[in-house]
Amino acid sequence: MQITVLSGGVGGARFVIGVREWARRDAAARGLPADAAHDIRVVVNTGDDWWLAGLRIAPDHDSLLYSLSGQNDQDRGWGRRDETERVASELQAWGVTPEWFTLGDLDLGVHIARTAWLRSGIPLSEVYRRLGARWPLGATLLPATEDEIDTHVHTADGQRMHFQEWWTRHRATIPAVSFENAGIDTARPAAGALEAIAAADVILIAPSNPVVSIGPILGIPGMRDALRTASAPVVGVAPVIGGRVVRGMADACLTAIGVDTDAAAIARHYAARGADAARGAQGVLDGWLVAEEDAASVDGLAVDGIPTRAVPLWMRDADTSAALAGDAIALARDLR
């Protein structure tokens, strides 16, 4: 079975780990070699990418790369384990990088390799393949687009800044009024991204930030249409539990676009795929998972054309992450 996941951020990386773990357990239960029964492809948000010190930084891709390879720093929740920061100190001493965005030495190795390949004309999709070939990931990572669509934030006090500055330096404390992905209107899906959606047996939207992680993917021309015409069911997982974001400051992003920090509100933001087609809307969901704490929203979402199940959403370890992935796949199979 081919499972395609739309993902961004640390929450997305944890969910993909769960999908891989579910796939391996399912293969083992059927007496098949690990990674043999299922093909996992991940369409990765590139809106968080940016240029820093002449290097192309890709936080969402690297979160997935490090998590799937076991190289991630589990204590901090980001970056490489056993990291040092000698080069970062030098860069900051020279005023080349800001003190609020530290690049570890091992992490810099990835950024330098990525930038060297890009500057030599290697397409981003091939760069993903080369970086992923170093470790056995158990999944194929695909950029949503090879065009630069860096996210910028317009704030209530009239500033325009890169998303990384707003998110990392200011911790989303400056109220945002809108988000902009310059160049997205002419961007094209990356090689393999549309194919991953079209060929999928199951399509999952990870519990990533709906605005700045999944939003840029859906905003690339052709992506939303690909989801709407895919033969596979599309099931999303809520990134909110009991009215609270699971990780990060997604609530600040949702407020800026007028969506409540609520699992049902986010589902309606994505909208039902079939139910909205007659009205010309652009909904993408066939099904939705909410936390047990949000079970009261299940019936209302069903009325809106989004079959919903309440399941445990906390991804605390391999067992709970695999169980969540299994719940999403089970709903997709039932919808199919």
Image: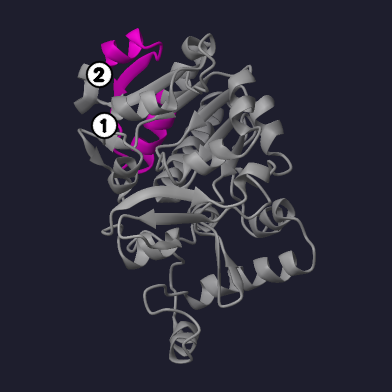
Find disc 1 in the rendering and name its residue.
Answer: 262
Residue furthest front in the image: 158
Magenta stretch: residue 310 in it? yes
Measured as percent of width and height from the top left, residue 87 is found at 50, 85
Above-or-below relation of 251 to 96: above
Measured as percent of width and height from the top left, residue 321 is found at 38, 37
The quadrant in which the N terminus is found is top right
Measured as percent of width and height from the top left, residue 108 is found at 55, 74
Q: Residue at x 44, y 46 (%)?
A: 212
Q: Amino acid at mark 2?
A: Ser
The quadrant in which the C terminus is found is top right
Q: Amino acid at mark 1?
A: Asp
| Residue at mark 2 to residue at mark 1: CA–CA distance | 10 Å
- The image quadrant of residue 159 is bottom left
The residue lying toward the viewer, choosing from 56 and 108, is: 56
Residue 331 appears in the figure = yes
Above-or-below relation of 167 to 83: above
Q: Residue at x 68, y 33 (%)?
A: 194
Above-or-below relation of 296 to 166: above
Q: Is residue 74 left or right of residue 13?
A: left
Q: Is residue 296 left or right of residue 310?
A: left
Residue bounds of the magenta highlight? 298-327
Q: Are marks 2 and 1 in contact (CB under 8 Å)?
A: yes
Q: Residue at x 72, y 39 (%)?
A: 192
Q: Is residue 159 left or right of residue 228?
A: left
Query: Tag 1's secondary structure?
Result: loop
User: Label 2: few (<14), some or many (≥20) within 10 Å?
Assistant: some
Which label sits on residue 297?
Answer: 2
Q: Residue at x 44, y 81 (%)?
A: 85
User: Label 1: few (<14), some or many (≥20) within 10 Å?
Assistant: many
Measured as percent of width and height from the top left, residue 316 is found at 30, 43
